[in-house]
Amino acid sequence: MKLIVVTAPENKPEDTKHIQELFHVGLESLHLRKPDQEKNDFENTLKQLPPSLYKRIVIHSHYKLIEK
């Protein structure tokens, strides 16, 4: 079975910590869904995560960040 998680749309300070913990215990794919988050805040959320996890994260807004 493949475990996939979709984040809550609300922003919480501990989001990146919990995301990293989920990947550490075996999460395969995460859907980062923050529809009300501004582009800069969304990018900062991603930057708080190790780049090695990026290939396992699906973003649901600010698609131009994929190019970075």
Image (cartoon, rainbow, N blue to C red):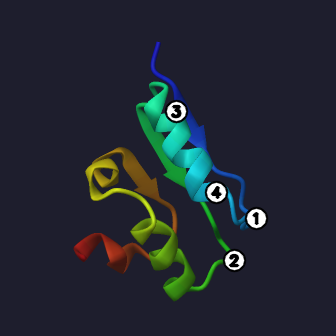
For disc 3, the marked residue is 4
Mark positioned earlier in the residue sequence (4 or 2): 4
* 3D distance between C-alphas at marks 1 and 4: 10 Å
Mark positioned earlier in the residue sequence (1 or 4): 1
Give neighbour class at mark 2: few <14, some 14-19, many 20+ (Cα, 10 Å): few
For badge 1, the amino acid type reads Glu
* 3D distance between C-alphas at marks 4 and 2: 15 Å
- In the foreground, 47 or 8: 47
Element carrying mark 1: loop
Mark positioned earlier in the residue sequence (1 or 2): 1
Element carrying mark 3: strand
Which label number is shown at residue 10? 1
Residue at x 52%, y 49% (from the top left corner): 31
* 3D distance between C-alphas at marks 1 and 2: 8 Å
For disc 2, the marked residue is 36
Quarter of the image containing the C terminus?
bottom left
For badge 3, the amino acid type reads Ile
Mark positioned earlier in the residue sequence (2 or 3): 3
Residue at x 64%, y 78% (from the top left corner): 37
Mark positioned earlier in the residue sequence (4 or 3): 3
Query: Which residue sits furthest top?
Result: 1
- In the foreground, 51 or 55: 51
For badge 2, the amino acid type reads Asp
For disc 4, the marked residue is 15
Position of 21 with respect to 57 (left or right) is right
